[in-house]
Amino acid sequence: MAPVTVDSTSITTTQGQQPGIFVRSFDSQTAYAGTIIVESSSISTEGVNSSGIVVADAVRPGFGLRAARGGTDTLSIVSQSISVNGTGGMGILVDHRGPISIKSGSITTSSQNGGNAGIYVWAGDRVDIDSDRITTPNGPGIVIYGASGAVRINAASTTVGTGGDVGVFARTSTGDISIVAGTTSTARRDILNGQITADGVIGISTGGGAITIDAGTTTV
């Protein structure tokens, strides 16, 4: 399990299926990367499924509730600015079973057909997220599908447009959830998939984890 380090100043991509940074951290068999460190100053992508930063086994490893499948070593992402323009492109997309730390400056996503999220994570262990600003018109702001590890989210500003859904969402099995949201705004008024409305901040623990939410200023 070799460690992976990525240190990038400026990246621009202009075709579909081309993330700014793609760390193929595991395959469907038995090979996993070790400790992963990603540091990025500026990323701009354009095209279908062209996310800003992806740490997973594929450019677009699915969508929705499921268990994490990645490695178990530590993952750290530090990003200053990400701009994504294209259907299905996420700002930061992670599938990882080990501890995760994400520090994000500005993330902006846009497309005509949706499927864009600011930060989207499948996790098995502890998750720590510090987000300065997320703006996404056609997707959720932050989504964490966790497990037994604790989830801590500090989201200073999250804005979701009329084609999006929830502002900040975290779900675990037994892990505690702590969310501090400064300003959260969502604008969608209809029902998504028959069950999800455009709520501001949501925390769910199916196995009894403690949930603490400071929703700050929330407009829905």
Image (cartoon, helix red, strand yellow):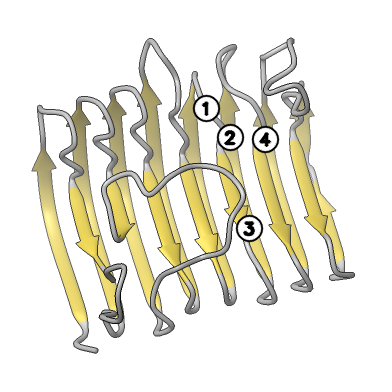
* Mark 4, secondary structure of its residue: strand
CB under 8 Å between discs 2 and 4: yes
Which-is-in-front pick, marks 3 and 1? 1
The answer to which of marks 3 and 4 sits earlier in the sequence is 3
Q: Looking at the picture, which amino acid does disc 3 mark?
A: Ile
Q: Percent position (x, y) of residue 135?
A: 48, 28
Q: Which mark is residue 153?
A: 3
Q: Amino acid at mark 1?
A: Gly
For residue 1, which quarter of the picture?
bottom left
Residues at marks 3 and 4 touching, judged by CB atoms closer than 8 Å: no
Nearer the observer: mark 2 or 4; the answer is 2
Mark before the other along the chain sequence, 3 or 1: 1
Residue at 74 percent of width and 73 percent of height: 175
Q: Quadrant of residue 210?
A: bottom right
Q: Amino acid at mark 4?
A: Thr
Which residue is under mark 4? 183
The residue identified by callout 1 is 139
Q: Nearer the viewer, mark 2 or mark 1?
A: 1
**How far apart in space, not on screen, are marks 2 and 1 (Cα)?**
11 Å
Between disc 1 and disc 4, whose residue precedes? 1
Secondary structure beneath label 3: strand
Task: Estimate how packed mark 4 is, as few (under 14), some (14 to 19) or many (20 or more) residues with alpha carbons within 10 Å.
Answer: some
Left or right of residue 4, residue 68 in this image = right
Judge whether 34 appears above or below 183 on screen. below
**Residue in view at x 31 percent, y 83 percent:** 35
Mark 3 packing: few (<14 Cα in 10 Å), some, or many (20+)?
many
The residue carrying mark 2 is 158
Residue under the point 20% across and 42% down: 43
Query: Mark 2 or 1 closer to N-term?
Result: 1
